Amino acid sequence: MAKTNTPGHMSVAGQKKTYSAESLRSFTASAFEKVGVPPEDAALAAASLVEADLRGVETHGISHYLPLHIKRIKIGLVEPRANIVIKRERPSTVLLDGGNGLGQVIAGRAMRMAIEKAAHTGAAFVGITNSNHFGACAYWSMMALPHDQIGIAMTNGSKLTAPWGGRQAMLGTAPISVAIPGDREGSVVLDMATTATTKGRVLLYDKRNLRLDPTWALDAIGRPTTDPKEALQGLLQPVGGYKGYGLALVIELLSGILTGGDWSYHLGGPLAEDFSRPTGVGSCFGAIAVDAYMEPDEFKAQVDRVIREIHESPRAEGCERIYMPGEIEAECKARRETEGIPLDTDVVKRLTDMGDDLGVPFPAEM
Amino acid sequence: MAKTNTPGHMSVAGQKKTYSAESLRSFTASAFEKVGVPPEDAALAAASLVEADLRGVETHGISHYLPLHIKRIKIGLVEPRANIVIKRERPSTVLLDGGNGLGQVIAGRAMRMAIEKAAHTGAAFVGITNSNHFGACAYWSMMALPHDQIGIAMTNGSKLTAPWGGRQAMLGTAPISVAIPGDREGSVVLDMATTATTKGRVLLYDKRNLRLDPTWALDAIGRPTTDPKEALQGLLQPVGGYKGYGLALVIELLSGILTGGDWSYHLGGPLAEDFSRPTGVGSCFGAIAVDAYMEPDEFKAQVDRVIREIHESPRAEGCERIYMPGEIEAECKARRETEGIPLDTDVVKRLTDMGDDLGVPFPAEM
């Protein structure tokens, strides 16, 4: 039994160079500024992208998304200085039109509003429409933690999976993150796609000539396949079959339909590849103030206790350690904050070339 | 590929007798009244239990839970006239102490408060502690639908599964339901345990000498097993491995810890079997008012469109029909409202005996 708890963001091992988080944040922010993003927004987008690299979630870090965001801004598909407008507002809810700005900037605004509202009313729920890819969900849910709040983030995206029983790509990976504050033992940070795996992992298995788990993907006519090549012609499966499909559909309806946008089926194809139109991403965010229920210190002490009880519980045969959701990522971040962030040499080359075009030098290795 | 969308509540086929929902509701309400439950509360508990039978979710209907609730009230482990107290309240949140009353009565109060608050503030989140098993989650989330709200319900319960990598029962099946209003095409009603299957299904497979799916259960030392007998000595697996574990943990922390109770690990063992102490169940409920985001008629028309798009999408090989979450249950209810609710003869005998003890005659067949 694969008790690895490995999230879907394994990367292909190659030659690596190592950079400090600070130097990558500075490079990323400068790149955004060069294409017209205001400094404060550029800093937020840079911080959230590099945070994914720190946490070992490279699929959502600068390697893939920084060149993509820069390109989309340059060709006019993303507004570098978006006009974010409140469309509806109640004491505990907001609907924001993101004006097709950077997803990170709109998500940051939305989550800040959710936190402010929850501080007054106890709980809040904020939706955004006309937005773009905001990176990893956990960055936004975790914004609630220093406020002693529970944070929630979810989004639609590129269509990569079918309804259960179908074979047409209609639903996104429909990720959801929930961040719950603990104290000394750390916080619980769930951040999961509702698909069984990621396209990145299928690509990796193809490269390494490995067979897929039969619950991960479907071939072109909707049959489960263990062949990565067949899977690449087909689709990802929802996690747990009809359960993952149900979760994904709920996330699609909240993120896309309730916000006045659309579900992934009608979005602009894979976000990385369709340069013909705005992505039209919709997302939503929740915040729950712990002190609406109990004293935050007491709550965090209880969360710590649960974490300890799980850590100390007997392990299944072959399992060396039981992890909390988000624990692998938190440990990776602690390590990379001192040891630096490793980037594949081909990623370094791509980012260096991009920087040269913009007049922003790529930083030196650590 | 098993494209059956079959939820976990298959029942063992046996001899059946058929009863009208109305007659079972009346019997159930009278039984509750006989043990001291006020008429209005008895009617709610009866309606919610029989609704599960109407929807084909027999595991949460009267067969199992009515005798259990009656027994617990009779021996003093559940308060028939509970004193439900507001412990904390904000404009969008409430924490209720349920006074160890019937879970249905406390859940009904909580969900009504969530709906009222969301009507004013746009969104609300209500927690309950010191409660009991409230039946199927969907009954409570669906209370939001006639108010043009999105309803959410989740709860802790009996410990039946381990943290991912562990082998000790610590987490409940941690169910969550989300109900989203549609119009002519019906509503989307997700109601799922975060375990891969139910103990009931394992028992059924054992009875029928069938092998389990290897992702469903673990043996006593935490290894996946396809042998139902080994599984009955072991545990259920979380759905999708570490993802289901993460979801379950979040649901446990919100339902049990945030409400000031505890997580399933410390609850009174399997709810059906531990008659030594109150169950101490905690649950939480959310409501989001659609009109805080858009006109409800427009929203419901868009949900209808999504449902049609999914229904009409191409099917995987071997799949005859693509279902929406809750569609099988809604169709079962429509059928059973006219054709009646089938009950196994041994269930009829047990309920008849219980009724005789209470002086409440079991109804005649349809």
Image (spheres, coloured by chain):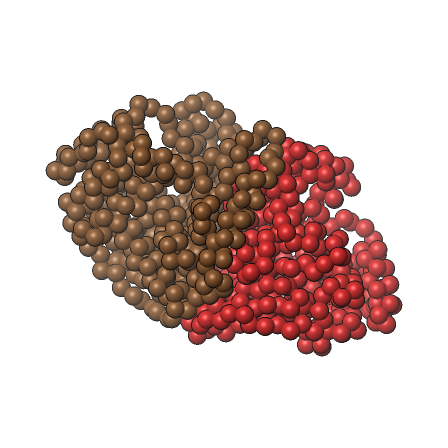
Chain colours: A red, B brown
Foreground pick, A142 / B75? A142
| Residue at the (27%, 38%) spot, across then down | B21
- Name the quadrant of the C terminus of chain B: top left
Q: Is residue A140 left or right of residue A210?
A: left
- Name the quadrant of the N terminus of chain B: top right
Find the residue positioned furthest to the left: B359
| Residue at the (50%, 74%) spot, across then down | A116
| Residue at the (80%, 55%) spot, across then down | A344
Find the residue positioned furthest to the bottom: A39
**Residue B237 visible at all:** no
Q: Is residue A271 left or right of residue B366?
A: right
Foreground pick, A42 / A163? A163
**Residue B226 visible at all:** yes
Question: Residue A218: image x %, image y %?
Answer: 65, 36
State whether residue A168 is above or below residue A61: above
Choose top left, top right, bottom left or bottom right for residue A47.
bottom right
* Numbered disc total: 0
Q: Is residue B47 left or right of residue B120?
A: left
Question: Residue A10: image x %, image y %?
Answer: 70, 49
Question: Residue A311: image x %, image y %?
Answer: 51, 52
State whether residue B297 is above or below residue A318: below
| Residue at the (79%, 73%) spot, across then down | A34
Foreground pick, B203 / A3? B203
State whether residue B75 is above or below residue B321: below
Question: Residue B128: image x %, image y %?
Answer: 34, 58
Q: Is residue B90 left or right of residue A1?
A: left
